[in-house]
Image (cartoon, coloured by chain):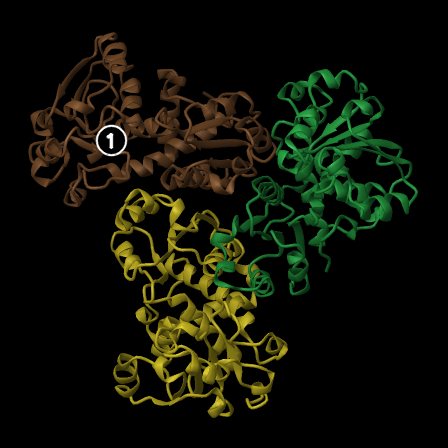
Chain colours: A brown, B yellow, C green
């Protein structure tokens, strides 16, 4: 039995299998409409995340399966002091697979070690959110046709952005990837990524302060939010903030076939005027998230083989 | 693709189609038991409303469909600052149709303008609650056999009562309707209803202060609550409150075939002793609400034709 | 139509039928996989209880049925002042059977008196929790092969423990049962159990202060938590607390075939080292809880006959 804790749990080849399966689901959803009949997914969300929770639930329902669980810790046994280990043993009696979101790093890992059903980490604190990364990979591969030979801009808060770190780790395993790291000085990627991943593996990358500096070079632009509180000073924030807001004007600098991704929710880092641009694929990305989770569930339940 | 924002969105003829379909569902529910198999309803309740939410969920489940969503804003992405427009684009990837309850007037309309799935307004602030109105119409038509030639008493808070305003608007489109408007002076219907709907269309109506004044004339009595805080003074409240409480004694003044409706929940405006009276149909009304929503879902999903 | 309010609602013979049906479900779950197709269970949880709620939901889903409801009072009509009587009349239009958890004793009984669908008490305050008791009986009978001729240790807070009182009442109906009542002095079973149940029926029992005193005599050890606040003094708590914590060392005193049960959630009254011991069956008990609820639903819906 396998679990999914980190995007690197799966080999490149296994990921290929998963992404191919997701592609097949997209091509012929009717074929999968009852494949999980009689199976149950537990969504154990110790902190709310409507987007991720509903994506899992839609995925399971699309395959004829059922869903039970909780959407926040107030309505869970956690309030009564039960350990995650005990909770997962209980849930193992109720469901065939589970997706767990938890504010504490490592909680899904503890669960997986005590579980008799597959556990999917649906986000654990600032640590990992592997199904988001798989979604990002599926979106890129589906719309670009490849995961190698790409120049990828990552823009925003690269210091604390869990999604960004995971995506770098995941893409670093493919050939000829160049990263353009676009962030304010105080929000640059942490050393353990720069040194241990990028430099160690000899991956091309460039760190810049302004989106306009590299926009025209990109195959993919992955946007994330920069929170005001994370700047050193109000002055610095005012001076820099427009550099991290994507609008129609900046989109004119980008290539015809550049894709804009965003893990969502967005606040104002992408102007709504960009939504109409065919290069803006962040809502398509939501749909790919459902296909990715469907494929993942099928593989972890061993209904489909790796 | 159509949405439902206001009870007047549908023509009288379209409403007829919907009510006929609801009648057919009631007559032979088994025929519809799997008609929505593989379809998903999203219930997006930004404020709690158990009655309305569960009515939609029961409706969808009665037809073999699935349900996902949230029951209050705390567990939704709204807390993270996402716009309704972005949320509905996400939900469009997860579900085939959605019912949205929102404390802000117009939120479901904004959603419908950005949605690729049908949106049903399940109540937006003090504005509209069209499925309640369709429920009321179905109840009256099913139990009275007609929607014209009726004398309808509307009792309680006619100033702020969203349900009452919608019902007046909806019934004003049928022939020979008389409204008896029963309320304290300070809670009379607003001018834009009195002038723009009733007088403008030349509809018979009478405004009275006491339920007993007109009870014997009514085919339908539609009760709503009068909240104490809305009276001008404590004295006035004490003097008047019994006029808006329906009890067994008052029921003796009513016709044999008068029907009592109430949108529920009731607090004390109808004594529980009235529940046993066969003319009390407010719990039947709940059942009609399920049939009405089933018919609505089938039409909006274009499984059934208008 | 029948409801379930208290474990004693069913005769010993009826319980036998229920436990036999649960056994058959366990032996061949596939036979029951669609038996509730088209039926709906409402879970009305006026206070959160993830364990119990999800057990009911899993039970219904295992039989192909649907589930709707609410998991805490904040998202229910209760907040708007609706009575339980009115709520159940509404729910009767939405579902075929309901499980109600309520902080007030007697609320499910009031509901059952106004309901047109079967109501299951899923815990009402400190009063009753009959499906826990049925779960306990099923666990014991399945793993011991009998419900008579047993020596049962009940350990912990015997004064306030609803689960313990129900279990005593339920087992008192079988032949040759001996109870070992293990608790601090201030948390001994109440007189109405000691006098009215045990002494009245001439049932063997012994009250002791320390688990070690009787551990070697037991066929079954039923553990519950002792809350610190319930001791008379801090000194007393420190002196006694270790007597009510089951660990590997104490397990050495117990028989080879003694079973350890616990209604869960546990906090620290059973050391995690005990989990590996094959005599620890509290997680199996969770699984039996699902089978017990499946059988109960089938009987109350009259899909299976008593």
Residue C132 x/y as whole percent: 70, 42
Q: Do we see residue C87 in this rendering?
A: yes
Residue in the foreground of this view, choosing between C152 and B93:
C152
Q: Is residue C223 left or right of residue A88?
A: right
Side of A244 where A293 appears, left or right: right
Total tally of numbered discs in the picture: 1
Task: Tell me the quadrant of the picture where the N terminus of chain B can be found.
Answer: bottom left
Q: Nearer the viewer, residue A299 or A125?
A: A125
At 50% from the left edge and 32% from the top edge, which residue is drawn? A98
**Coordinates of residue C196 in the picture (x, y in percent):** 86, 49
| Residue A300 vertical placement versus B5 (above, below) | above
SS for dot 1: helix
Residue at the (7%, 25%) spot, across then down: A213
Quick check: C45 above or below C183? Answer: below
Q: Does residue C98 appear to the left or right of A105 in the view shown?
A: right
User: Which is nearer the eye, B31 or C117?
Assistant: C117
Q: Position of residue B247 (x, y in %)?
A: 57, 81
* Mark 1 neighbour density, 10 Å: few (under 14) some (14–19) many (20 or more): some
- In this picture, residue B303 sits left or right of residue C214: left
Q: Nearer the viewer, residue B266 or A91?
A: B266
Q: Chain of mark 1?
A: A
Q: Is residue A20 visible from the viewing direction of this image?
A: no
Kindly indicate the quadrant of the structure image that contains residue C104.
Answer: bottom right
Residue C198 at what x, y percent from top left?
Answer: 87, 43
Q: Which quarter of the rendered picture does the C terminus of chain B lie within?
A: bottom left
Per the image, the residue denoted by label 1 is A143
User: Which quadrant of the structure image shows residue C166?
Assistant: top right
């Amino acid at each position: 039995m396998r679990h999914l804790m980190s995007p690197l749990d799966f080999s490149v080849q296994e990921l290929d299998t998963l992404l191919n399966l997701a592609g097949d689901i997209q091509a012929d959803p009717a074929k999968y409409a009852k494949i999980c009949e009689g199976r149950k997914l537990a969504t154990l969300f110790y902190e709310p995340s409507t987007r991720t929770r509903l994506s899992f639930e839609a995925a399971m329902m699309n395959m004829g399966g059922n869903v039970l669980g909780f959407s926040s810790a107030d309505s869970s046994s956690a309030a009564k002091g039960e350990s995650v280990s005990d909770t997962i043993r209980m849930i193992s009696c109720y469901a065939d697979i589970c997706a767990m979101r938890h504010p504490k790093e490592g909680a899904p890992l503890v669960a997986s070690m005590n579980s008799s059903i597959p556990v999917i980490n649906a986000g654990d604190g600032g640590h990992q959110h592997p199904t988001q990364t798989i979604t990002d990979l599926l979106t890129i591969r589906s719309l670009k046709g490849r995961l190698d030979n790409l120049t990828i801009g990552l823009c925003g808060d690269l210091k604390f952005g869990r999604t960004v770190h995971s995506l770098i780790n995941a893409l670093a395993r493919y050939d000829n990837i160049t990263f353009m790291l676009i962030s304010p000085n105080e929000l640059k990627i942490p050393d353990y990524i720069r040194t241990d991943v990028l430099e160690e593996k000899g991956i091309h990358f460039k760190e810049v302060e302004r989106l306009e500096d590299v926009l025209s070079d990109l195959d993919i632009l992955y946007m994330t939010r920069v929170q005001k509180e994370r700047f050193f000073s109000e002055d610095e924030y005012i001076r820099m903030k427009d550099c991290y807001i994507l609008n129609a004007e900046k989109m004119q600098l980008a290539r015809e076939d550049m894709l804009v991704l965003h893990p969502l929710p967005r606040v104002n880092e992408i102007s709504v005027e960009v939504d109409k641009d065919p290069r803006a694929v962040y809502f398509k990305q939501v749909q790919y998230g459902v296909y990715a989770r469907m494929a993942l569930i099928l593989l972890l339940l061993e209904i489909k083989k790796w």
